[in-house]
Image (cartoon, rainbow, N blue to C red):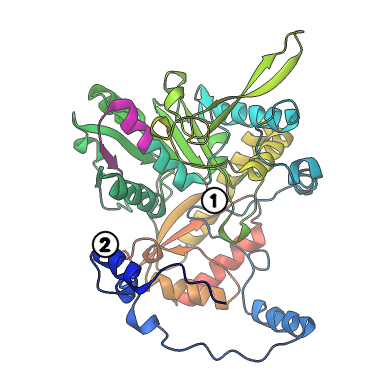
Amino acid sequence: MRYLPLSDADREAMFARIGVDGIDDLFADVPRAAWRDALVDLPRAKSELEVERLLSRMAGKNVAAGSVPFFVGAGAYRHHVPASVDHLIQRSEFLTSYTPYQPEITQGTLQMLFEFQTQVAELTGMEVANASMYDGSTGTGEAVLMAHRLTRREKAVLAGNLHPQYRAVVENLAHMGGHEVVTLPPVPVGEDDVMALIDDDTSCVVVQTPDVFGHLVDLRPIAEKAHAHGALLIAVFTEAVSLGLVESPGAMGADIVVGEGQSIGNGLNFGGPYVGLFATRSKFVRQMPGRLAGQTVDAEGRRGFVLTLSTREQHIRREKATSNICTNSGLCALAFSIHMTLLGAEGLKRLARINHANAVKLAKALAAVPGVELLNHAYFNEFTIRVSKAAANVVEALAEKGVLGGVPVTRLFRQNGHDDLVIVAATEINTDDDRAAYAAALQEVLA
């Protein structure tokens, strides 16, 4: 017997309460052309072998990241991940472990989180880091909420060159919380005037470096202006490897540093799961979201690890919670930590130098192609080029020639023009042959 928990009268009462006429009104944001008034005419059931062959043929239509020269970035980057990382994270004690509620039986997980936090704090130049967030974008949203709590203000200023997907998360949370967000338009060439928007009502200013177009940003003057008005500077990064070569945000005056850690230890993973890095000053730690693992000693003086701080609603009263984040990206954080340990401080610097050198070589090769203009003066491993034809068409034509040549800016900023710009990334995986293939293909496409 079918279970119907609600009567027609119950539904009518709910529609009246939220102010709609019927169920269709709840899907008003879905374009009418996408609606289906009848069931989809699916084919008859197939065997497992038939389905496997069908899906393999469909998957074969894709151009896989590892099958051709690859120069796509804009928030997710393809780096070499040592096989030992994947081997170690698949040990059953890591792969199957859940959250470290019981310190007496989860010492390994707690120690890993402690070491991960230490690495993130040193990488960002901050004093304390949490045990990770879901990804860089949600970490940015949490950082803005944290700044509101600390300053007791509700206005966030976002730089125009903040990754638009990160900005969307901040704006969505602000919409639901009734907070104010001031956003500048993107500036592919040069810097926006974010400092002019900082005033005594500002809670925080959010700036990404390297920004979404690859420009390196000096955070010092922005930090000084923010602090002069009692606001906080939130520094954002999408490429964690850049911190091996670029001066840390903490050294430049940032109060909260958030970003994406996917580049270290984690593959592209079809867009996730990723690992958000979150660090701040120790004086702000009680307003930090997520959890914090700490080191201690037991009654006999033996070293141990405990869940030191967890200001989430499962552990404390909901109205006192700093965030409703339920857990951390444990396995991705472990992969990050293992890769960082394998690299060491000098290895990370060397990796960062290789990334930057490869990007410089690529930029020179592309800038020599007729019809191409390089927009960046200073960059790490990502830059933006202007091409003489529509960028989206150019990228498609490059893919047909076997080169994944970057991200058209119109895919990220749909309302702001810039349809002749492409964001290009280079990492340690790119060879001289890859760069030559890109330059040759681009010359053919633009001819």
Q: In this view, does 332 lie above or below 109?
A: below
State the image coordinates of residue 259 (x, y, percent, origin top left). Answer: 49, 41
Specify few, some or many for label 2: CA neighbours under 10 Å numbering under 14, 14-19, or 20 or more: few
Callout in the foreground (1, 2): 2
Q: Magenta stretch: residue 156 in it? A: yes
Q: Nearer the viewer, residue 334 or 403?
A: 334
Direction from residue 49 to residue 80 in the image, left or right: left
Mark 2 element type: helix
Q: Which of 30 and 356 is in front in this view?
A: 30
Residue 218 makes an appearance in the image: no
Residue that carries the numbered disc 1 in the rendered image: 359
Q: Nearer the viewer, residue 70 or 88?
A: 88
* Amino acid type, label 1: Ala
The image quadrant where one finds the C terminus is bottom left
Write down the quadrant of residue 334 in the picture.
top right
State the image coordinates of residue 387 (x, y, percent, origin top left). Answer: 39, 67
Direction from residue 143 to residue 87 in the image, left or right: right
Q: Residue at x 30, y 36 (%)?
A: 205
The image quadrant where one finds the N terminus is bottom right
Which label is found at residue 71?
none
* Amino acid type, label 2: Ile
Q: Distance between the residues labelled 1 and 2?
A: 53 Å
Q: Which residue is drawn at 24% across and 35% down?
A: 195
State the image coordinates of residue 355 (x, y, percent, origin top left). Answer: 59, 46
Numbered range of the magenta stretch: 145-160
Q: Nearer the viewer, residue 19 or 386?
A: 19
Q: Residue at x 65, y 81 (%)?
A: 58
Mark 1 element type: helix
Residue that carries the numbered disc 2 in the rendered image: 18
